[in-house]
Image (cartoon, rainbow, N blue to C red):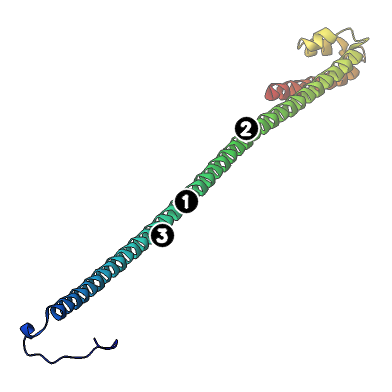
Amino acid sequence: MRNGKFERKKVDTVEALSKEEREAILADMEQEKQKKMQAITEKMKQQVKRKKKQQEDVEAKKRAQMEEVEALEEERRRQKVKELKNWLRQKEEQDRAKKERDAAMVLEMQEKEVQKVEQAKVLEQQRQEQRDRRLQAVAKQKARSSDKKEQFCEGCPLERAVLLGLFSTAKDTFRDTGEGSLFFQAAQQEKLNASQREQPEDAHQDLL
């Protein structure tokens, strides 16, 4: 160095340099070495830092992916739970509707059975009323026939003989009196009335 400037000195060997020059050169070399070491160390630090950041980025990406997967799984789980709840609710509604339909069918069948019983009672009552009316008609007809018989037999001394089948004897008795023809006509009328009385009794047997 001269006047603050570095001047190259031409030498052939290290021994040609002075001690101060050699020390200065060694100091420069050491300084350069230290600079390189610092640069290497700094570079290594940067590399480690970059690698660490890369690793952190990878880990962060993995965590994000895992969180996304977990979120998807959680969403699927919630969706499945929701679908299951909906299915259970629909199943419950279907079961309740089926029970209501079954109960309505049973009630309808019971009502039909009650209606059948009521209709059967009404029909039986109508039949009974018809039988009663027919029996009353038969009784009235018999009563009318009995009244006619009593009216006819009043003043007839041989009514018992006619009813007992002794018409011929009564006819002989009245043949000479002039009343035989009249009695004969009355007896014929009584036989006709008796035959008519037998017919309602037969009808009464048919009704029973």
Answer with left or right where residue 208 lies relative to residue 103: right
For mark 2, does the 10 Å Cα neighbourhood hold few (<14), some (14 to 19), or many (20 or more) residues? few
Residue at screen point 90% across, 15% down: 152
Amino acid type of the residue that numbered disc 3 sits on in the rendered structure: Glu
Q: Nearer the viewer, mark 1 or mark 2?
A: 1
**Front residue of 114 and 200:** 114
Q: Secondary structure at mark 1?
A: helix
On the rendered image, what quadrant is the C terminus found in? top right
Residue wearing tag 1:
78
Point 40% across, 57% down: residue = 67
Quadrant for the N terminus, please.
bottom left
Per the model, the C-alpha gap separating discs 1 and 2 is 47 Å
How many marks are shown on the rendered structure? 3
Q: Which residue is mark 2?
A: 110
The percent coordinates of residue 141 (x first, y second) are 83, 22
- What's the amino acid at mark 1? Arg
Q: Which residue is mark 3?
A: 68
**Foreground mark, 2 or 3?**
3
If you read the primary sequence from the N terminus, does the residue marked by circle 1 or circle 3 appear first? 3
